[in-house]
Each structure stands twice: as C-alpha cells, then as structure tokens.
Amino acid sequence: MYKKIDSADIAFLKSIIPHDRITIGTDVSESYARDELGDAIKSPDVLIYIRSANEVSLIISHANIHRIPVVARGAGTGLVGGAVAIHGGIMLCTSKMNRVLELDEENMTLTVEPGVMLMEIAAYVEPKGFFYPPDPGEKSATIGGNISTNAGGMRAVKYGVTRDYVRALEVVLPSGEIVELGGKVVKDSSGYSLKNLVIGAEGTLAFITKAVLKLLPLPGKTRSLLIPFPDINNALGAVQGIMKTKIIPTAVEFMERDVILDAEKFLGKTFPDKSSEAYLLLTYDGSDITEIESAYAALAEVCYASGATDLLIVDTEERKEAVWSARGAFLEAIKSSTTQMDECDVVVPKNKVAAFLAYTYELSREYNVRIKSFGHAGDGNLHIYVLRDALDDIQWKSTLSTVFTHLYERAAMYGGKVSGEHGIGYAKLPYLQSSECATVLELMRGVKRVFDPNGILNPGKVI
Amino acid sequence: MNIIVCVKQVPGTTKVAVDENTGVLLRSGVEAKLNPYDLYALETAVQIKQTYGATITVITMGPPQAAEAVREAFALGADNGIMLTDMAFAGADTLATAYALAGGIGTRCKYDLIVCGKQTTDGDTAQVGPSLAEFLDIPHMSNVISIDKAGSENIHVSADIGEYVGAYEIKLPCAITVDKGIYVPRLPSYKRMLESVKQEITVLGLEDLADTNPKMYGLSGSPTQVEKIYQPEAEAGQVIIDGSPNDIASRLCHELRELKYL
C-alpha cells in the first residue's frame, strides 16, 4: 500500500534538509523504533529533525504524492505507540523546532513551536505571573505530543485538559498546505471546529507546526493535603463529597500503601506517612492561604464521615517534595517492581471509580495476576497496570488480552471511554474499535479520509 | 523523660532578597516556616516519646509571629511551648541566642534531653545547639544520625563525625543536634492543630530570665559583627531573546560582546 523509500526520495529529502538533521536507514537509533509503551517495533526509514513549517510542508507534500508514511514525533514519551513508524517511512521529530514565539500578555496567550517541552512552558510563563494549567506527569513531553493526545494530567479536575487551552493551531495538511485553525479568540462559533478535530488526533489528520495556548493568571498559593483512609473504598467514597465543598481542588489523586512502598523502594526515600492502607492527595490553589485554609473544616467533615483519621498538611517546599516526588515516581516504581507491564488508561464517570477499581481486584484474583493502580480520582481517569512478573510469553499475552478485554468492557458498561489521556496509538486500537459503534467509527474514518485521502499521516493509529 | 526541642522560624523560600545597603534580609512579605532541620529534631523527640514515653516542650526565640512555629510544633506532636520574645533579644548572634535559650530553659524547664536541629537554613552555622549545652553545662553530641536506645540515666546515639560514624552513650541530661535523615518528619496534623488551638504558649521576656542584664542579649550581647551580607552570584542563567530575526541576531551579538565571547 505504501511506497518504500528509495534513493530518489532520499536525494530529495537531502536537498531540502541539512545533513546534520537527517538520518537514514540503519543509522536511525533503535530508540526511535518505540516509545514508552515498551518493546521496539519498527524504525522509520528516515528520521528528520524539522525546524520550520515550510520544511514540513515540502516533506509532506512529497510524501503525499509518493504515498510515503509520515509520523510526527516529539519527545517519544507516549504510552500507546502513537509515535512509532509501524509502516516505516519518514519520521519528523519536532524536538529541535522548539522556540517560544510570543507571549501575548493582552490576550493571555503563548505561541509556541511543537517541540517545546511542557516543563519549558511552565519555566517561561510562571516567572511572568502566568499559568498554563494542563499538568501531565511527564514534564519532558512536548506540547505537540500533548496536543496530539489531548493530554490531561492532575489539574484536570479544576482546570480541564489540553484541549481547553489550545486557542489556535498552525498545521500542515497532507497536500503541503499550511493553514491556521482557530485563533486568538475566546469564543468561536464559526463553523466546524477543525482545530478540535486535530487535537487528540495523534498526528493522523494534520501535522502541528505551531500552537497558540491560552494562559491564566498564576495562582499565588498552592497547598496539598494527604488524607489517610482505612481502605481504598473509604477514600474513593469521600471524593464526591469533596467535590461539593466550597473550593474545588485542582487535583484529587488516590494511592494505596503498596504503591507507596514500591515508590519508596524505587526512590530510596521514605514517604512521610504510610500508616494507612489508602490515601487521597488533594491540591488546592488560590490567591492566598487563608482562602485555601477556609476549606479545611468542611473537607474534614466529609473525609471523617468516610473514615479518614486526619488531614495531613503538605505546605512547605520540603513537604511537597517528599509527597509529590513519590507520586511522580509511581509509574516508574511499579515498572521496576515487575518484568513487564501494560497500562489501561480508561476513564469512567466519576461516580463509577470505586466500582471499577473493585472490579480490578476481582480480575486480579480471578486471573492470578498483579494489577496495580493509582490516579486521578477526581476526574474518573484511572491508570491500571497489569504486571507480567513470572509469566512466560504465551501466558502473558493471553492473560493481558483477557484482562484488558474485561476492563474495557466494564468501562464501556459504566459509560466510560478507552483512553482518558494517553490516546489510542496502535496499542489500544482494537479496544477503541470494539467499544465504539460502527456508525461512530465510520464517521471517524470519514474525517480521516477528508483530511488525509492517501492515508499517509501516522498510518495504523487511532482508526 | 522530659525533652526540650529548640525550633526557629526561617524564611519559607531560599529566594529572599537582601537589602544592598544594609545587608539585611528582606523578610517582609516572605512566608516563614519551621527550620527544616528542626523538623528532624522534633520528629526525633516524637519517636522517643512513642517508644519510651516522654513529654515534649518546644522553645523558640523570635518576634511574636514566631508563635506560629510553636503552633506548628503542636500539630507535629509537641506537648508544651515556650517563646522567648523581647526587643532585648533582637539581633542576637548564635552566642547570644544560645545564652537566651539557656536562660529560658534553665529557669523554666525540668529536662532530661535537649534536641536541636543540626543547623538552620538561614544561618547554617550549627553553633546554637552546642553553645546552648555549654551554657547549661551538660554533655552534648552533634550530627546525631540515630537514636539507638534511650534509658532513664543515659542515651545511646550514633553520630557522623566526618571520617566515621561513632556510637556514643551520653549521660542525661544532655543535648544532641540531629542531622537530616535521622527520621522522616511527619506532616502536620489538622486534627492536632485544632486540638491545640487554645493551648497557651508560655511567653518569656528579659525580666523572666535569671540574668536580666540586657548587655548579655540581642545585638549588644553578640560578639559577631556582620560587615556585609550578600547573595552569591548565580552561576547558571538563561536569557531568552525575543523579537524579529534581525533584532535577535543583533541583540545576541551585543550580549556575546558584553560577555567577551566576541
């Protein structure tokens, strides 16, 4: 279906891209054959570090004419194989197209190139008193990747997800045409929102070359609370009540003691409290501490009614570091506790989180496999990890497939979705296809055909 | 066992500006926090209390707002609080501070063990704990990294004295300064905070101490003369140059010339 890259294609690419930004064939590092999902799958035939929309335009229009796959890649931190060239072809890496182009203080927007890392955005805007709220755990991810997966993160409870903070996109279409979708406007009822189709499309519809992000004023103060509960059901039982108290938390994370112990072992650091089986970690922000502290009494009432024994205050830099460094290490800590793992990033309605987690324990017992989890109790997005441990290859594949099928079926039964924030890539493709109805899937395919009639953009992903 | 823990309020951030003319830290508007090393001291006392039984009294010296440090100590497990506050104590160096603390402890407390953090994060001298013990004429050990056993007559500790870790048995009453990492400090408890909200803090001024000679305290009792305080120069920095390509190029050239790279 796709054309294999030949010497004429390479000659063309070399004619428009300097030598130091293009790598061919076996010279491409093995790390580009995979993302954080795991095993290497396939390397691109050509890897190019792009610098401008014009370069992207020339490359993509050539690829479109010759039916060569083009895969966008940022920092390679995705978790579903979205930025892996499973059909080979050209990989365009954005990590050197990473300038902050403009801070528009009047419109409160930041214009960036796609390779700017999330941590760089925070470092740029926060000293100037601005705030970019989306807060995925992987801070070295690029904004292009975040937009392409509609990344969520811990502050989604209060602030929403990446989609809510993209005002405009400059994209390159498969034809090579460069167009702007959206604008520096707060409201927009001007026809179909193509910008919102491109967000979360994982590079299958268009190639993002510039993004205009919406900023907020930086909240003056933040404070976290670690709340111990006798077990996870008590902890999750408190969440709905917490959301109804006077101040909405920016983050509501749940964690269980065994994951905390994994993080302690992984980091070589002791967590400040592990006397309880389960915890909620809440974060509040506001203009001053008094405003935040005024929420404590009502919060305590809700949490005590659900079995909490205390509210532990995480206020100073040292305390935040002690608690949040562990929270930030959960994924790696779980990974280091086993031989291999795969993740289910389902999202369910908020009132189904407890029931869904209880179901994971059932599956764990039934299939005799370790299943660990932690995550965003406030927005219903769960990260469920199935661990391989000592299973052989055949047992692992079979158990994983069965457990995942059960998990996604249960999520669908609860009105949930396959992915809360990691996307579909190729790894979750079968689950998307089995969870959406034929009509919806056909609409998605139709959208893909309109944007990318030759199917050259990130083939084999999403749909 | 009666344990005294010495605590101090320090700036809540390392980014405190310094007045270029006077060399004084500009603390106004800067949030304060308990000195991080004192959290290890307090946790050490709470661990001893949980294992062997003890009453913990915290003592601090500072302006009236230093009461916040005592209140936080209540939320962390302290039973009683003493605050030395008097204009006569203002501007004290480590010697005058230790003398005032010794006066407060000596006149008001029955104690078996005094626990201090190794040092403060604003002064970094590590002198107050040992000086205090000298004024009280009791044995002391610095850089304690573990409490191995506590009895009614003595305490066994391990201390990192640089080239090796030594095991020491110290007769009570004594003072120890504890190092970072001896225990993981617990987080303040909202429940304890509420329970202790009406708890009184004993406030002591100059007149309450055995030695009421003001020349022994504060600035006048401090042999240390600070000539200048300044921030060390940052070695790493980042400059972002915005503008049109021509503007950026010319400003970059200018910057590089200024830095003598061109």
Image: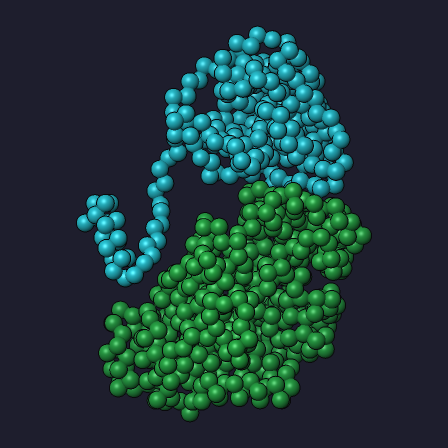
Chain colours: A green, B cyan
Q: Position of residue B213 (x, y in %)?
A: 57, 7
Q: In the image, is residue B229 above or below residue A77?
A: above
- A312 to the left or right of A137: right
- A215 to the left or right of A15: right
Count of numbered tags:
0
Within the image, what quadrant is residue B105 found in? top right
Within the image, what quadrant is residue A453 found in? bottom left
Q: Position of residue A292 (x, y in %)?
A: 65, 47
Tell me if residue A292 can be seen: yes
Q: In the image, is residue A56 above or below residue A256?
A: below
- Of all residues, the one furthest to the left in this rendering is B262
Within the image, what quadrant is residue A443 found in? bottom right
Q: Residue at x 49, y 16 (%)?
A: B219
Q: Position of residue A458 (x, y in %)?
A: 45, 80
- Of all residues, the one furthest to the right in this rendering is A305
Tell me if residue B138 can be seen: no
Q: Nearer the viewer, residue A31 or A116?
A: A116
Q: In the image, is residue A180 above or below residue B252?
A: below
Q: Residue at x 62, y 29 (%)?
A: B65
Q: Nearer the viewer, residue A216 or B260?
A: A216
- A78 to the left or right of B74: left
Say which quadrant the N terminus of chain B sits in.
top right
Q: Residue at x 35, y 50 (%)?
A: B238
Q: Position of residue A18 (x, y in %)?
A: 25, 72
Q: Residue at x 49, y 12 (%)?
A: B220
